[in-house]
Structures are given as structure tokens and as C-alpha cells.
Amino acid sequence: LSKIPGGASHVLDTEMMLASAISSLATRLKEDVGLDLHVYSRGQSFDESMDNALRLVKENASGSAITGITINVCDLGDADNDMGYGPYAHLQDCTVLDNDDSAISISVKPWDCSLRTEPWTDLHDDYHLDEQKRETQSKSKFPTQYPAYEKQYQIKSRDAIKPEAVPPLDTSGGNMQLSIPELQAIPDSKDVLKIICRSLDLDTECPETRKILENERNTGLYGSHWGGMDGANLSETDVLAGLEAFASCNEDDDAFLQSKWWQSRRLERNGRSLEHASITWMMRGDSDDDFAPIKTTNLLKGELMVRYLAAPLLFGTVSSRTVWHMASLEEGGALDFIPLFRKSSVLRDLVEGREWHRIFAAKNIRDDYSKQEETPALGVTQAAYWRWHGFLCRYEKSIVAKSTGVASNDLSMKEGIVLVHGFGASGSQWSKAIKALTKSLTPDLVCDDEYEAVAPDLLGFGESEKPQLSYTQYLWESNVASFIKEVCVRESKWDEFVIGGNSIGGYTSMGVAADDRVPISDSINGVNAVSASGAPGTNRCTGLVLMNSAGRILSREEVQNQSGLDALVTVGAETAGDDLPKCRPPPRALASFFGTGLLGYLRPRIQSICKNLYPTNPDAVDETLTTNILRDSLDPGAINVMISGSKLPPPRTANELLGADFGSARSHSKEDSSIISAAEGYWSGRTLVAQGILDPLNDAKTRSQLLGALRSGVDVSPITAGHCPHDELPDEVAGVVAEWMTKTKSSSSIESSSMIIA
């Protein structure tokens, strides 16, 4: 349970969903097969639980002719097994099965719900080639780009495997139906909460812990079961009814909203979540009525259903096969041969995209496993995976420094740096900078045994999934903040972190650093404490590095020229208070047309565009970079990010996020701020602006000067490079970062939360 995606940062939502799923399973098992569900939940570890459960089965089967026990387990794939969520991996490592010496044999039988078997078979064949064949065979069976995969396995013309019917109970041939009364009590939500908290080492009796859990409730993506949908309605029956309603409307969003199923739903908006506010803003459109019915015109086609299905697909209350076969697919028209006009199904696109990313991740994991050294060298990056709202996401990780055993202070802390890529890039673009950091970070900067670097692929980019969602700055900020909580803090046990980013990654990092200061409270002096997701921060961020960051920066003169509410209200407060200008994006079809055209224009020009962005060292634009960008842009759903760019909500300014001396909530007087009903965090700590001043996309030198003038504690270091200095001149950037860290280390202790009424 400690490995359930989102479990550590959405405990109460996970509790409701798990309880609902288990109850649904018990009902279906009894009604369809006539069996009672048995639940064992007392073990402190997987091995202990399995050992005790098997012992109970054997004791209740004593005196019978039973000779064997088969453990049927769903194999979720390499990525989920690797991250510890897939149960099959735990069974493979279970020492209880290896050491069993009873007369009753135990076997493990894996099964899966893949849409097709052929891709997995080819992947298996590639992986099991002996070394000699690997060297002589120039091409593997499994493709590395989605169009080739789609063509090779005839994705558009061949049906997915049909869901299997529930088999009748077979008590012949020696099969036994056991009944163990002590395991037949189905855990309710309170029981599930205790189990989850025990697995996460959380003390639910502690008022502070309970406060944290309450603050994190309903902070997921709006319209998902982590963000507004009732987690108690995750039963198979309810999900199938929703799918039936959507399919019967021919996947028409407006008709779906009028269905009885949707009308019976209640979406609970979190008033602290800017992501919730931004989606509400889109659904309100140009209406002046705050209570007008929601519209889907400004969302992506089928987006509400994509958000809704995230949890059911993760928890397995519905399978991808079922979703695929319940889809409503219209007949193709005369222009079906043109991708833009090809009829498609939102449901099929969703599960086909999930399947592609799942199997491509499996390929990468197996390839990396065959190359891995037992002890990776410093600066060598390795790929790993995690899930956010059920969507598979990839990240790069590396150890960049090891302590000499004598820290520069008396603390024993585990630290790391999070590096966020820019538009169209991925975490892989940081590999050179990460390697360069190993030469620049001195051991005296490392408080504990190791200093780690991680570089996530944002949802919608790199090798992460690209679901049909409206991508906003708040979605990406929430994505990275959850990554830090789930992967860096929970899994890797970081006590502190520095975050840095390039381009939109820099802007995202600013938002994450600001939101990390939002304290554990849903109200401060009677006002809402807003953040991208609505969740409180970790208060573990100790530094921020900006490299040619995106985002609006207001000069002192611009602020002085503002008048009225514009001079008093931050964008964050306007967003939370539903006071933004009306949402009037171009029509969905037009946005799709231009997005598709833009991608088509950019793909053959990737190398020349990148070289233009790397004016000092164009040779840094190597084949790996251009191949990765092209491959990622061909993934199913890549167009969704392009479409979303036409309807982004107004972004919070750098002044707001960095707590500037002017143009921020911090700079407003109490008298002025008293009229505003939102509170927001801001980053007041040490900040480095490592700016490539030859950036052809903007006046980078002036922007760096504007950032430096916002407040004290913002250090500017100009670098003779273009838009991506970390990849163009990695050694120079690493040196600047290390020097800044050395200079500011003594004053980098975590400050108290920075919060202001906005």
C-alpha cells in the first residue's frame, strides 16, 4: 500500500477509493461467482502477509485432498513492477514461496489485461536474444516511435482483445471452495485508512497529521477522484454505467452532460486549488453568470471522461479492454485518410496511449537493466517511472556527489536537486548538466552520504503519457510538486531540495518553490490559502535556480503605473476569486488544425531550430537530443499540449512568485490587502538566475536584470549562451550553480513559511 501512486499525498482520497473498490469486488465476486472475498491485512510486510495468509489457507484445507495452491496475480508491466506498485514484483521477490517446504505445492500464475499480445511477445523476443545475436541483429522487432508501432501492429484496424467473461465456479477436479470466517470481514473506509496510515508510518491520532491529511484531500486534477469526484463511487457498476452513458451519447460531451449518470454526479471544487479554478474558468467560458451550466466547448474533446477514468483504470475497477470495447466509434468520412479529419474515439485513444507508454517503458527498463552497473558511476543517469493520477511518468535520476563523511555543518540531512525541462524537451536534456555537476559539487556541500539529482518528464512531454487534458501552468506545477512529495521526499527520503528549471521549467519551478511555502492550514485568518493544487507545501525547498525562465516580470515602473484593483490584486488572487477576464479561446477544431500544422512544420526542422537556440555551441545539438524530441512529439496525444497553449489562463507573475518588493502580495499594505479573500505563498529564499544572454527568443539580458531587481537574495549570473545554457554549456552552468550553492549554503536553512494575504 505504501507504493500506491498518490497514496502518500492523497491519503483520504485513496482511502475512499480503495474501500469502494474492495466493496465492489466483494459484491461482484458473490453475485457473479458465488464466492466470498477474503481480505488479509494484518501483516507488517508483503512476506509476512503472504506467509500468514498461506498458513490460514493450509490450516483450513487440512484433512482434504488438496495438493497445490495457485496464486493468480495481475502483471501490470515492468514500470509498475519496478516502482513497487505491481503485485507481481513482490511475489517474485517473496522469500516465503521459495522457503515453503510443506506437502502442498505453491505456484504463481501471472495474467494481464494488455490490449494485444503481439507487441509484448516481440518485446520479450528482443530482450531474450543472446549477446551475439544482439550484436549481429541491427534492428529489434519492437519499434521506438508510435507511428511505426501503430502501423506494425495495425492499431487502427485490428480490435483489441475482448474482456473475458466471468467464468462459472468449477468445483470439479479437486478444486475447493474454502471459507475462512476470520478473513471475511470486508474493511470499511475507516479500516482502510488505518491500514494505509500504518503502511506509511502515519499517526492518525496526532492532530497535526490529521490536519495534513485533511489539507491534502481533494487536491488532485479537477474532475478526477482525487479532485472533486466522490471517491466512494469507484465501484465497477458505477464506472460501467458512466462508460455506457458516454458511449450512448456517441462520446458527445454536451449530450453526456445531460445524461442521468452525469446529472447524478457532484463535482466538489477545492477553493484553494488554482488548477480547479482554471478549469472552472474554461468551463464558464464567456458567460457572465457564475451559476450557468458548465460547458465543455473550451475543454478538449472527452476531457471530463478522461479525468474521471484516471482512478478506475489505476485501481483496476475497469480494464483497458473494457474501455476499448465500450467506445463509440463513428464511421470514417470521405476525408478519413487525413489524420486531422479522421474519426476517432476518446476512449480508445486514452487506452491505446496508456498501452503504448506502458510497453515502451517496459522496453526501456529492460534495455537499461541489461546495461546497468551494480554501482552506477557519479553523474550517470538512469531512467525510472512513477504514476501521477494513474498516468505513467518518467524521470532521470543520478547521484552527483558523495560526502567525505564530514559535512560543512553538524546536520545529517539528505538533499537533492530537482531539474525541470522546457517546452518540447524532457528530463534527458539535463544529462550533460547532471554529469557536469559531479565535477563542480565539492564533498563539503553534501550533508549526508549522497547528493542526488532528478529530472522529471512533465506530463505531456518526454516519455511521460500525454492524455487528453487541458494543460495549464497549474497542472505542471501540481505535477512537479507531487513528484517531489511522492518520489523525492517519500521514496528517496530527502530532507531538503533545490529546484531549478529552464524556460517553462523555470517558471514551473518558481511556482513550485512559492507553493512549497504554503503552510499546513486550509485557512489563515479566515482566508483561503491557495496553491496550484490546493495542497500545502513540504517547506523543504532551500534554493531556486532559473535558467532563461518563462513568465511575465513587471518592472517597478509598470507597477507604479497600475491603478485600481490591478495595483492591489495578484493574478493568483484573481484566479482563485473567479475574477479573470472571460475565457475566449479559438474554436477547438481551429486550435487542433493550427496545432497539427505547427507540429508538422517543426518536426523536420528540429535540428536547425535547436542550433539557433544554441548560438555559442551549436555542436551541442547532438543526435540524441533531436531524436528524443522527434520521438516524443510523435507520441499519441502530443498535440494536446499544443492545443492547450491557445487557452492558458493568465499566469502568476514572477513578482508574485518571488515575493518582490513591488507588484506582489508581499508588497501590498495591510489596508489594501484586507479587501482580498485569498492568501498565497511566495518564494523568499536564495535564488540564482543563470541566464543565457544570447537567447534569440527574447531580450534575455534585460529579463535577467528585471529578475535581479525584484528583491534582495536574487543573484544574477550572465552566461554567454542561448535559450538552453544548461545543455549548451553544461560545465559553465554547473560551475555557476556550485559556486552559488557554496556562497549561500550557510544561509540556506529553511525559513519559516512565507505567506501573505493577497
Image (tube, rainbow, N blue to C red):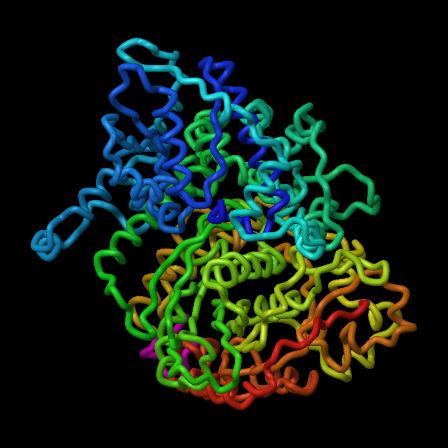
Residue 142 locus on image (x, y percent): 24, 46
Q: Residue at x 69, y 31 (%)?
A: 265
Q: Residue at x 58, y 33 (%)?
A: 19
Q: Quadrant of residue 24?
A: top right
- Is residue 214 placed above or below 527 in the rendered structure? above
Question: In the picture provided, is 610 more to the left or to the right than 717?
Answer: left
Residue 129 locus on image (x, y percent): 13, 48
Q: Residue at x 49, y 38 (%)?
A: 42
* Residue 612 located within the stretch drawn in magenta: yes
- For the residue pair 637 and 363, the one nearer the viewer reads as 363
The segment highlighted magenta reads: 609-620
Q: Main secondary structure of the magenta part?
A: helix
Quadrant of the image for the C terminus?
bottom right
Residue 269 locus on image (x, y percent): 73, 45
Which residue, as the protein is rendered here, is positioned at the far top?
Answer: 172
Q: How many marks?
A: 0
Q: Quadrant of residue 439?
A: bottom left
